[in-house]
Image (spheres, rainbow, N blue to C red):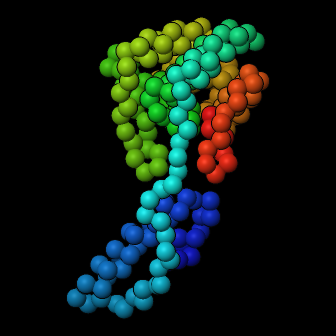
Amino acid sequence: MLAWLASKPRRKAISVSADATALRQFCYYLRRLPAHVSVPEPLWPRLPYESNFVPYILSKQEVHYLLKLTRKLDRSPFRACLYRALILLLNCTGLRFGEALRLRMRDVDLRARVLFVKTFKGRARWVPFDPSLARELEKHLRARCLYASAHLDDYFVCWSQPPNPADANGRGHFTKALSESRFEARSRPGGTAAV
C-alpha cells in the first residue's frame, strides 16, 4: 500500500494524504467484515492534512497592465484578441491554465454564461461567469471564426491554424509572451513564479 502511495513522486503531499486516508478507511472496513482475511495494516506515514499552497492573485493594476500589453501584439491580428480573452478567462473564472486550454467550443455557453470544465483532478464542474466576460468571449469568438474553424469539438483557445489540440505549447506561448512583455511576475512562497 505504501509503495502505491509513493508511486507518483511529483504529487503534492496533501494529495497523497487524501489517498492514504482512503486506504486507511478501506483497512478499517476489511477488519469489520465477519469473515475478514487478516490484512496487516502498515505503519502510516505522518502526512499533512492542510495544503500550504498560496496562490498569487494579480492586482487590478497588473491585470490592466497585461491587457494593455495585448494591444501591442501585432504579429497576427488574432493574437492580441486571443491573449486578451485568455487573460480575462483565467482572471474572471479562476480556471487553471490547463483547464482553459482544454475547453472545447461546446463547453462554452455564452448565452447562459457558463463554462463546463471536464473532469480534472477528479471532478467536472460548471463555472458561471459575468456578462462582461461573455461580451469579451463573444468578441474573441468572432475573431476566431475569421481565423480558424469553430466546430463544437474544436478547442476554444486555439494557437494555430488549423486548430491544434491544446497542449504544453499553449503554456509556452503564453509565458513567452509574458516574458517578451517584460512583465515581472512576483514569486510565490517556495520560489515558483506566478503567471
Question: Which part of the image, by quadrant, shows the C terminus?
Answer: top right
Residue 88 point in image, percent of width and height: 52, 21
Q: Which residue does the image show at 36% across and 91% down from the upper left?
A: 38
Q: Is residue 162 visible?
A: no
Residue 137 point in image, percent of width and height: 48, 16
Give the side of residue 188 with respect to residue 39, left or right: right
Q: Work out whether 52 lies above or below 107.
A: below
Q: Work out whether 136 lies above or below 177.
A: above
The answer to which of 129 and 164 lies nearer the viewer is: 129
Q: Work out whether 16 lies above or below 160.
A: below
Give the side of residue 43 with respect to residue 25, left or right: right
Q: Quadrant of residue 37?
A: bottom left
Q: Quadrant of residue 82?
A: top right
Residue 188 point in image, percent of width and height: 61, 44
Query: Outermost residue toward the left?
Result: 34
Q: Is residue 131 visible?
A: yes
Q: Which residue does the image show at 43% across and 51% down from the upper left?
A: 122
The answer to which of 72 and 147 lies nearer the viewer is: 72
- Numbered-mark total: 0
The answer to which of 84 and 179 lies nearer the viewer is: 179
